Amino acid sequence: MGGRGGGRAPTGFVWPPPGAGASTPRPAPSPYQPATAVYHNPTATTPHVGAYQHGVVYRTPAPAPYAPAPSPAVTIRAPSPTPATVRAPPQAAAPPTPTPSTATVAKELEQKLFVTETALAPPAAAAAAAVAASQPGQPASEKAPEVDLAPVSKKGLAHPARPGAGTAGKKVMIRANHFLVNVADNNLFHYDVSINPESKSRQTNREVLSELIKIHGKTSLGGKLPAYDGRKSLYTAGSLPFESEEFTVTLVDPEKKDKDRAEREYKITIRIAGRTDLYHLQQFLCGRQRDMPQETIQVLDVVLRESPSWNYVTVSRSFFSTTFGHRGDIGEGLECWRGYYQSLRPTQMGLSLNIDISATSFFKPVTVIQFVQEFLNLRDVSRPLNDRDRVKIKKALRGVRVETNHQTDQIRRYKITGLTNVPMSQLIFPVDERGTRMSVVQYFFDRYDYKLQHTNWPCLQSGSDSRPVYLPMEACKIVEGQRYSKKLNDKQVTNILRATCQRPQQREQSIREMVLHNKYAEDKFAQEFGIKVCSDLALVPARVLPPPMLRYHDSGREKTCAPSVGQWNMINKKMINGGTIDHWACLSFSRMRPEEVYRFCCDLIQMCNATGMSVCPRPVVDIRTATPNNIEHALRDVHRRTAELIAQQGKGGQLQLLVVILPEVTGSYGKIKRVCETDLGIVSQCCLPRHASRPNKQYLENVALKINVKAGGRNTVLERAFVRNGIPFVSEVPTIIFGADVTHPPPGEDSASSIAAVVASMDWPEITKYRGLVSAQPHRQEIIEDLFSVTKDPKKGTVNGGMIRELLIAFRRKTGRRPERIIFYRDGVSEGQFSHVLLHEMDALRKACASLEEGYLPPVTFVVVQKRHHTRLFPEVHGKREMTDKSGNILPGTVVDLMICHPTEFDFYLCSHAGIQGTSRPTHYHVLYDENHFTADALQSLTNNLCYT
């Protein structure tokens, strides 16, 4: 897709406005001028803009998946030992080209991302390389030979080293749910396991290996107690007495629990795959090696997971059991099980076992009839299921294991693959080779003397479509211990949170009890491998960063504000830039009386005007009401009527705000937003009827703040933004701050697109106003596809586009300056995707910059932001007023960059917010790339301050 600006100009310079170069003097801050809407751009010609120009811009999926241009083969190199790297001097002027060549950008990116290995080479190797380079007669390929170093990774990018620990803020001590792990110096051996016939079930594989160890453990296996990952890998402390061996064991088929106890023979081949020792792990933990010995850590992690894998239900890195507490009913045939999360992590204090309390949803072990009744909320089970209900049940039960209960002497298990299209009473199938056909109802009566009751309902189907097995719902019961992996509805989420929400003191106590319950000191596998787990939470030094001073409008009684424990209010303050709304309307889908809705609107508009906005006191059309089953029609009707009235008045413009009072029943919010934002181009503000019917001043203030931002205003800015060089790394040169994330469809939605979103700051130096773009991309793809794109246009030729390019141009239009520094916060990336995402997205960022101006390569800092982790921080002393907020959580602004962080890389935990209920989750920031050479204090303070704007 083409971005704004089209193809590059022949001059090699496409920034708007023409002639506004980097030498433009820095404009003096003018916070009190009326703000224009962030999202409005009347000159936009790109198809991204869609139906409207206010609000977030929605994009259609790119015509073809983004594939980075092939780059030359690159040797991954170790980073320089110093955090600073010298930026390359500007290139000499080159003849203008339509786009920077792929080779040029790839080579520049390689130079930026990778530095020479010789910097970390042993002195002799480095000297040899230097001597070789200085000899004039040698070819270039021979001058600088590759230096192969054991500690240097050849697998991924080398991330920047920690620039030292931060010192800013008040020093405090806190506890973290990390438990120190000590490991004896053993030789660890890895063996490949092959089981024939193969089984996809880890449980079956474990039972086969367990039987083998029981029979051959003290003989053929030399008395070793191996740890098994349930798939292909077996680990031992010390070697087995063979390099390759084949065994045979006989196991009762767990799927056939009948009288005969069907037996099955398995052939197991165990073959040596490799060995590892703990030397590299020790070097890595001490900071002498940058490459993480992932396999060694994986071996130890598998060892510590071996015992719980036998005793509990395993879900990813968590273990669940009904023995951990009361199983709570969360509705619609599901229940909540408690459990714990466990992961072995390398940290500055050494190996650490991260343990946390967790909970998730499971199918209730009930008959399928009862499940369907609860899932569909049916009162009358005698009525047939309609097609819609049948599809819902089919999606919910696909892949679920059931056991039959129509035979007292035999129980068999099946996996559900689908539902029949016809009711059981009409289902006929062949019963013998002669083709004799019989109904399922008649078959069960003749064969098992079992009279089926729910003949109006379809049958469950197991097996394949060519050889189906039909199972009446009433003859089946759901096997216990099966996780429900699909998306929960709002009511279920509320129920599971209510059942598991714990204040910090209770959560810390639960974690302690879980560690004692697990009895790591008595774990036979831990003993075999010489692993000892400390039983107390780590005591960690932390700092509490001061909150930033906030600036409000001079016309308010209070012009500045210092947040207290993460909170402040709008009393005696006015928004620094109030938005203007001339045309607004209100639509209620609730059961509120018309006079209540009218009173709420009056109060809300009054609050908007009192806090600094300029809002017309009267709506364009009278306040309207509609029923919740007529949402889309009502929204379109209001849009049409307001457009007609505005046109009749001859004032121009369009509806700027629609206040929507939601129905009492949940589930309408998404639909309202979809229609308003993507179809009609209306900025909407949704309000819950329980708040709108009894609005207090605090609620009205909060809604007014939301409306002001949507109208293009700014509520507050950082006071330090108005001081020369007041915000380190931001105030000194024009700086743009990006935020990016990808939202994936829930499990079970196999075809829905993932949605990528990118926002960027549009004001400098205040960095308070942001513009957002979204783009659909392939299902569950994490790399953002449309950061930069190149398309061929028959008339324009090569057209550059993409979200980064579009936002850089918008920044230039708003500020009159080009960004000289880029800070990119990337959300939602797991550790395993770090290098992949960095390589592709930095490549796109570089190309977007280079497509705007020759030699334009502003320094970039790329930070991954992680919320989905299990590190929790607790006050050292619970209940101590100066150490906690009102909820009992650690104070907002608490930052940790010692003991529990990465041994060598630049990362930290920051809890910037005050807790409300439960235990606060700190955010983990990991710097993957840093050309701006941030100090720890500078990046931590900037990140904390940004949370207040």
Image (cartoon, grey):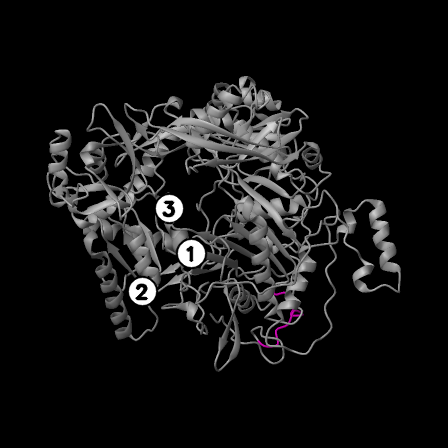
Confirm whether the magenta stretch covers residue 338: no
- The x and y percentages for residue 716 are 50, 52
Q: Which mark is residue 755?
A: 1
Q: Where is 473 relative to 504, above or below?
A: below
Label 3 neighbour load within 10 Å: few <14, some 14-19, many 20+: few
Q: Is residue 23 within the magenta segment? A: yes
Residue 680, which numbered label? 2
Magenta-tinted stretch:
18-29
Disc marking residue 747: 3
The front one of 541 and 550 is 541
Q: Is 178 located above or below residue 841 in the figure?
A: above
Residue at screen point 80% across, 64% down: 140
Kind of residue at badge 3: Pro
Residue closest to the far top: 522
Residue at horizontal 50 percent and vertical 35 percent from the top:
870
Q: What's the distance in space between the residues labelled 1 and 3, CA to CA?
A: 15 Å
Disc 2 marks which amino acid? Leu
